[in-house]
Image (tube, rainbow, N blue to C red):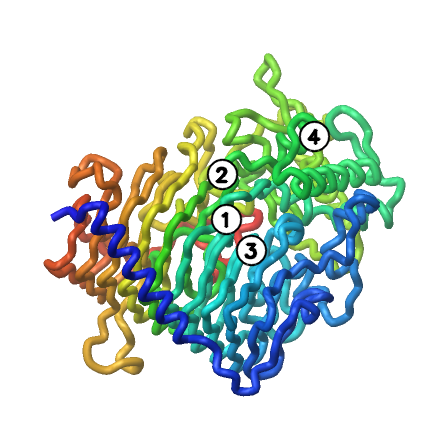
Amino acid sequence: MKLSSTLIAFALLTKSTTASAKARKAEAVDHGAKCLYNNHFSDGTLIIDQPGTYKLCDNIVFCPSNNINVETASDEEIASAFDPIEQGNPKYNNNEYALGFFAAIAVQADDVSLFLNGYSIAQCREHALMQRFFAVIELASAPFILNAGPHNFVSNTFTPAKNFKLTGPGTVGLSSHHGIHGNENENVLISGVTFKDFEVGAVSLNNVKGLSIKNCDIPNNRHDVPILGSFSAALKIRPYLKHLSETNPDYSMTLGGSVKSATEVYNTLVGHIANVYKDVMQYGFIDQATHPHEYQLYNNPNKVIDGPCYALLVHGKGPAVGGFGDMQSSDASELSNSVEIVNNIVQNIKCFTNEILATVVDGGVQNDARGAILQFYNALDEAYIGMDETETGTYTYTGNANLDAQIMVGKALNQGLLGDNILQKSVNSVSLPLIEWAEGNNSTFAPSFRCNGDSMHHVVKGSIMFRVEDCQGFMIKGNTIDNVEILSKSPVEVELCADFHKGASTLDGSDRMVADLRGISVAAVSAYDDSLVTGNDASSISHNTITNLKSQAAELIIGVDIQGFSEGVDIENNYVNLDASVADDSNDKWVGLRIRQTASDIFVKQNNNFVQGEIQEDRRKLPEYHPRPAGETEWPNNGCPYGH
């Protein structure tokens, strides 16, 4: 039986009222809590390295701009305004803060409680533009574990928070990435909090042992993002080019048919960055008429994050940048466990994924020193960028501000010219044949593209509101997901693809999930371990309502998806109606419930209502650890894919 739209609206209103009432009851009790004011954030990230109870006593706006005056500042001052390394504050370690102020609050102590106390904490618009990797609250001393991410972020010891509690009412607001992010945490409790205006996800935790997210409200993600991931690439390659121009002032190379010095390429890059900053601060977008080159490179036409987005994400060890999980690790220390996602409301989420074709040379993906892909094709405009095709079918390098900077830095790194400094070099994979082609010395070079990745060559997976994988024991209960829209185009023409991302899951392979959408996805999950609970130890997805999921270009829109080698999950009392105008049709893209062929012991009770039907694939067991051919294995702990 289908529920009427009036009844659905009433259910949402009732649940919202209930959640608000519960949040009000969660008001902070002052047990000697330390008040946090805006002045605690004037230098940058507030590092909490002592146990204790803290509370907001003001609406916090995180904006460590070094007092930049956009009216009088030079282009270089604007481009470096939010860089903690260039600001030179000794309390911010060069490794941990190499990519900037990655959080407003970094909790690197156990037994910390934070009461929002009815207030809000958020990035300012300026910092959200110039710091593209960020969490309002980071539950560790660094944003990545050792040997993960586009940099070694760990100087001595990675220190995750344990026994952390965040309590509403209050709001975790604007963030260029996450509301809360963490790795290797234990016993995290988040209750009665409003998350809004995040770009990637409200909460994202990797390898968490014990997590409860209850009675939280997620009314919207950010819908006014002015730039694409290519702007982040410009920001992050800038310090390398600056160092090159300062230490080798006579350095030059031919790019696009003319000789350019390091200083010239640097000035062009920082000019682009400053122009974007000024336009966005004045208008909220890049002015196409005044700055057409910047507009072509960086403008975001959909005004939402241009990569996969989530509401809540729980993953095993390492960053969640690979494909959906296949098989659980045999090492329990690499699995999340004991996760509860209960009575939360998610509404009005918009996302789009911008597929970036990764140039491949001699089998290796071409990325710069910070892991950003060298982009020679614009999937949004369906046109080459930075190169022209000749009448004879060859290609001529024309370049742009980003590519010139990335290739010049790549050449200098290959020559060993940047020396021993804080700018780490191991990620760079810009190769000699590509450099020679850009210099006009390799007329036979032709681009070869690897598809199904984003601007950092993370595997494209579409968007998922609740994603739980590599997890032992979870409960997803009583949540509402409503009104989610994906704005992605269809994947690029397959003829452009020499091959596909090597990090995709075994079953997905060359699947193109650019516009796909899932309400709840679990992969490589299992029941609770006997040592963790007593009695019925099955994981469960129950009493959830998922409605109004939209994506015009999707191949699949799925309410609940059970993926990978998952087992021991009960599914009961869920209502899924993805589109009120669509019934159960096995030939369309809407699927209420899907159980992949590798899953087992998934118990679907009779009291669910999947309006668009259920699909249970024919059972097929993966070989143990499903080894792939040499060179095509997924990276350890889903580490980053640079050069692969």
- Inspect the image, locate mark 4, and give the three-letter code of the amino acid beneath it: His
- Inspect the image, locate mark 2, and give the three-letter code of the amino acid beneath it: Asn
Determine whether label 1 and label 3 are within 8 Å by CB.
yes
- Foreground residue among 39 and 495: 39
- The mark nearer the N terminus, 2 or 4, is 4
> Which of the labelled discs sits on residue 84, or is there none?
none
- Inspect the image, locate mark 1, and give the three-letter code of the amino acid beneath it: Arg
Q: Which residue is mark 2?
A: 354
- Foreground residue among 295 and 616: 295
C-alpha distance separating marks 1 and 4: 24 Å
> Which of the labelled discs sits on residue 222, or is there none?
1
Label 1 SS: loop
Q: Please state the total of marks drawn on the protein image.
A: 4
> Which of the labelled discs sits on residue 175, or is there none?
3
For discs 2 and 3, the disc positioned in front in the rendered view: 3
- Inspect the image, locate mark 3, and give the three-letter code of the amino acid beneath it: Ser
For discs 1 and 2, the disc positioned in front in the rendered view: 1
